[in-house]
Image (cartoon, coloured by chain):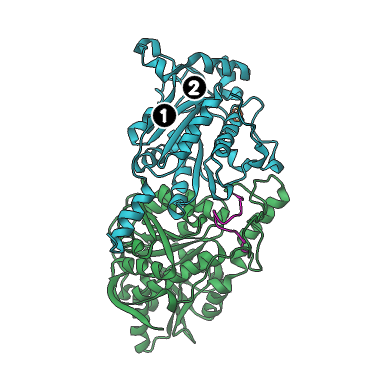
Amino acid sequence: MARKETDYSKYLRLEYIPHIWCPGCGHGSIMKSIIRAVDALGLDKDKTALVSGIGCSSRIVGYMDFNTLHTTHGRALAFATGIKMARPELNVIVASGDGDATAIGGNHFIHACRRNIDITLVVFNNFIYGMTGGQYSPTTPIGSYASTSPYGNIDPSFNICRLAEAAGATYVARANVYSIAQADNFIKKGIQNKGFSVIEVITHCPTYYGRKNKLKTPADNLRWQKDVSVSIQKAKKMSEDELKGKIITGEFVNKTEKEYTQKYEEFVIGKAQGKI
Amino acid sequence: MKVKESKFISGNEAIAYGAIAAGCRFFAGYPISPSSEIAENMSFLLPKYGGKFIQMEDEIASIGAAIGASIAGRKSMTATSGPGFSLKQENLGLACMAEIPLVVVNVMRGGPSTGAPTSPAQADILQSRWGTHGDHPIIVIAPTMVQEIFFEIVRAFNLAERFRNPVVFLIDEINGHMRAKVDIYDESELELWNRPKPENPKGWKTPYKRNEELVPLMPDFGEGARFNITGLDHSETGFPTGDPKVRQQLHYFLRDKIEKNKDKILKNEYMEVEDAEIIVVAYGSTARSAMRAVEVLGEKGVKVGLFRPITIFPVPEEDMYRVCKNAKKIVVPEMNLGQYILEVERVMKKQMPIVGVNRTDGEPITPEQIMEAIKD
Ligand code: SF4
């Protein structure tokens, strides 16, 4: 089926492009994926807020024509929570990197999942801190090289989707830049979910992660994504051994639970004002 | 002015009632002594007025959420004590840089580190001015009495909104927990300020275009202007810039927004300062002991007066100098090892002896201690 052509310029601040990302960086693909999801849903740009923290992926906010907020490292979800509480009618999307979301912002990540507040978090997972020069992150695979793991990384990684699921997010999915159409679909469903959604998109940093780990060209990185990815359906039939080093893609959680700001309106304001 | 009700409440509670009267409709906090009653009272009061309260996962998140809510149009507040104030500093800087109205209460306790969680101190005076990194504009208010706390928190919101700047509100364990009869006033009885905005926010592209007070005309998120807010150096559009001229100009604007509007921000109280030979400069709960000392010695014929800055930053340089220049001695009591005294020395150019009365043992400074220093 032919995909409907998206007019990207409708969602971009073209006057600020070219962007700062390196040639071949995967982040632009995710930005376009977010645009396709927003476009397909017909979201009102005036009623959409995009919030980010610090890092390469976080620079996305400057280029997108929404209500955009570039905050401090790791804290985007806290700011987004305040925005959503203040104006529940806004669609709130947060863009974050692996370090931003799960290292310095790890506490905010699990608590946003727990509250089930209606925010859609897109994690750009490239296994590295790009902005600061390629240091290892909480998702860097064991044995990988980074500017702070010159002898190979020994830290076990977070599985972002399992973390989100355990913490209570009501929509959790993983895609990659190689099969980006899947990300469009997941981001769309995440925005539609009235609750906290986490969409992890595996992306690549050819400049640092790639260069240090024998994935020099963007094409090498995409090929690697293709090779290590296994769909959730297929993974169910595989043994633990077979799954070693693989990255499972697909939908992990898709459930309905009462959303936080609705609960506040109904239970807290309702009780305080003697309506219930 | 018509009193809505009179209540026998603590300073912490007066903050909650005053904030509601000022139009505060969002609070995010995290439990910490001795400020927790502010969060407790806000959690009870806010939903009655259709406002929202949230207890966040930590101090950093709670100031973040408060800034977010302010960006989305709510008058917002967070409250904490010593260690929590340290944790909030980075995001406080973001609010200064992005020019987001916000009130941050710090019910001071002893430090450094965990220090003395339930004992009074005025430990964070210089941190309240210089806590976050980088040159930044800030307004700091340090009231004394419980009724005054009610009015001053209203003023804190007004200044935060009018100048689109965080206001740090300093009390301590003494006036935070001290109870007194407080007259509560309704919103309609108070002069309230709202943040400056463009007349028609729809399509507004220059969130950092300034009014005659140098304050940006920024719409709220969701009002139909889609612009960018960042902690990076930015131009009038809110987009990051590397242009040295624009960056320098931004930093000057941030400074001048407070410096050039000092007359609208400063507030002092004077007691017996005319032909006083000795002047006590005191703020916050310590000023209460200073008042007593001045009263007692005044009755005995000692020519002593009190200069009490209520806005302690920006420093009321001209007022302080004018009032104190003829004094033969200045006494600065504070529950720290000498913080605001550095400002007094700077302003008075050490023209006369300037002596501190200090303690950090968790006990309040008594009128007797101040009297001794006056007589010495
Ligand atoms: S450093 Fe890496 S993540 Fe950052 S823009 Fe360059 S390629 Fe992308």
In the rendered structure, which amino acid carries the disc numbered 2?
A: Ser
Q: Tags 2 and 1 in contact by the CB under 8 Å rule? A: no
Mark 1, ligand 1, within 8 Å: the answer is no
Which residue position is annotated with label 1? Answer: A160
Q: Which residues are magenta?
A: B215-229
- In the picture provided, is A32 more to the left or to the right than B272? right
Residue B98 lies, in percent from the top left, at 57, 53
- Chain coloured green in this rendering: B
Instruction: Say whether residue B194 is magenta.
Output: no
Residue B130 lies, in percent from the top left, at 50, 56
> SS for tag 1?
helix
Instruction: Say whether residue B226 is magenta.
Output: yes
Residues B164 and A166: in front is A166
Number of labels in the image equals: 2
Main secondary structure along the magenta-highlighted residues: loop
Extreme residue toward the front, this view: A1
Marks 2 and 1, how far apart in space?
Answer: 21 Å
